Image (cartoon, rainbow, N blue to C red):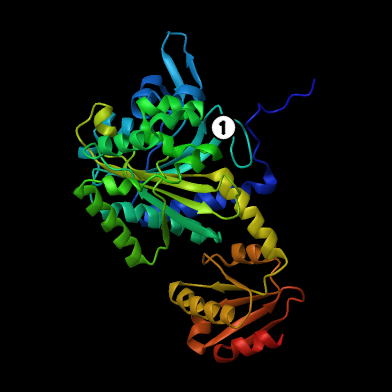
Amino acid sequence: MKLTSPRGTKDILPDEISLWHEIEQVSRDLFDRYNFDEIRTPIFESTELFTRGIGDNTDIVEKEMYTFEDKGGRSLTLRPEGTASIVRSYLEHNLEHTQTHTKFYYSGPMFRYERPQAGRFRQFHQIGVEHLNTTDPISDAEVIALGIHIFDELGLPDLSVTINSVGCPTCRPVIEERIKQFLGDSITKLCGDCQRRYNEQPLRILDCKKETCRNYLSGMKDIRSSHCQECRDHFEAVLEYLDVLGVEFNIDPKLVRGLDYYTRTTFEIVSNKLGAQNALCGGGRYDYLVESLGGKHTPAVGFAFGEERTVMLLKDLVETYENALKVYMIPLGQPQRCKCFVLENNLRRAGVKCELGTTDNLKAQFKKADRMKAQYVLIFGEEEAERNIGILKNMKTGEQTEVPITKLEKTIKGL
């Protein structure tokens, strides 16, 4: 009998491993730039960590965890997400006092027993960040901006931010009571999960993905009308900081996500190319998780994104560029990169499809240009900048010519 990988798992083969490396390297570089330090936690943890941290009544804990007893009779669980493990490590090692700052990132496999589908597996890989011990709404905006920065650096198109605020312990009871009042006796028209959540977690009803339930809830008043003043002020500040950065966003009053620990800000970065399961990255604020796991009150915010879905988009991107790219620019040094950024923008406005290299490694950039089937490569280093010229190489013939920067657009359009 031929052996195959277990259902819901996959081998990462050589033909796509370079995409995984690129995602991980870009993420690490940006995490360092944003001053996040790495933590690596065990793949399995005490089951209690997740039942207390994620919530007894969540789908993850009730239906999706891989839980087993070891030979000592201890209940252990393969980690279904990364945040609870980071918080456990934060508390266990007293990182608040031993580290100069409390901004962390992680990566690795997670495990959930759920129905496999495009971009969703039972073993999947996440990359995430956690900023602990901060109440400042600028921290919420920072992690959102960081997520967008990663995907921008990877060159992923057609992304948008969806955001909401789910309130805090002060106003959450008011929100939940208004949800129950809205549903009233009509709760029987919703699915079994929503009926069960009616008494236990009415806010989670908004997270239901079944079309019948979502259509029925469409007439419900925005939950933000029930926010306390502090939650309103916090959310408005987050939106203001996003505006300052030029981040476009959509407010979805039903975005609550599937974990009990979220408070106030919740958000997703979604792709228009992923179909129904369009969330590429998700996160939010969790001001009481540390406290629920035995620590003092420690507000925090973070996000996680799936590598499998990101790889799916990158593979589509490479296929698109293979047939379309005219010029691949290789700037050598940051000043030259700024200049090439302007040139790239001008060429695109002139109707030329082009792409900007991301590192100073000339050999690596030529390989990437070749993989993208670029017709021409423009090399622009310090010497070229001093002479205000670029070296234009025909990737098919290998011929190189010097082109004055002032005539670059005209030259390329004439090729």
- Residue 133: x %, y % from top left: 23, 43
Q: In the picture, residue 284 is in which quadrant?
A: top left
Q: At 63% across and 78% down in the image, what residue appears?
A: 352
Q: Is residue 178 above or below residue 333?
A: above
- Residue 266: x %, y % from top left: 37, 46
Placement of the N terminus among the 4 image quadrants: top right
Secondary structure state at the residue bearing disc 1: strand
Taking the view exactly as shown, the residue that stands out farthest to the right is 1
- Residue 277: x %, y % from top left: 57, 44
Q: Is residue 408 above or below residue 3?
A: below
| Whether residue 130 can be seen here | no
Q: At 50% across and 61% down in the image, what residue appears?
A: 153
| Count of numbered tags | 1
Q: Nearer the viewer, residue 286 or 130?
A: 286
Q: Does residue 11 appear to the left or right of 54 in the view shown?
A: right
| Whether residue 58 can be seen here | yes
- Residue 97: x %, y % from top left: 20, 38
Circle 1 crowding by C-alpha within 10 Å: few under 14, some 14–19, many from 20: some
Q: Nearer the viewer, residue 395 or 197?
A: 197
Q: Does residue 59 appear to the left or right of 377 in the view shown?
A: left
Taking the view exactly as shown, the residue that stands out farthest to the front is 185
- Which residue is the site of mark 1? 123
Q: Nearer the viewer, residue 140 or 108?
A: 140
The amino acid marked with disc number 1 is: Gln
Placement of the C terminus among the 4 image quadrants: bottom right
Q: Is residue 398 above or below residue 128?
A: below
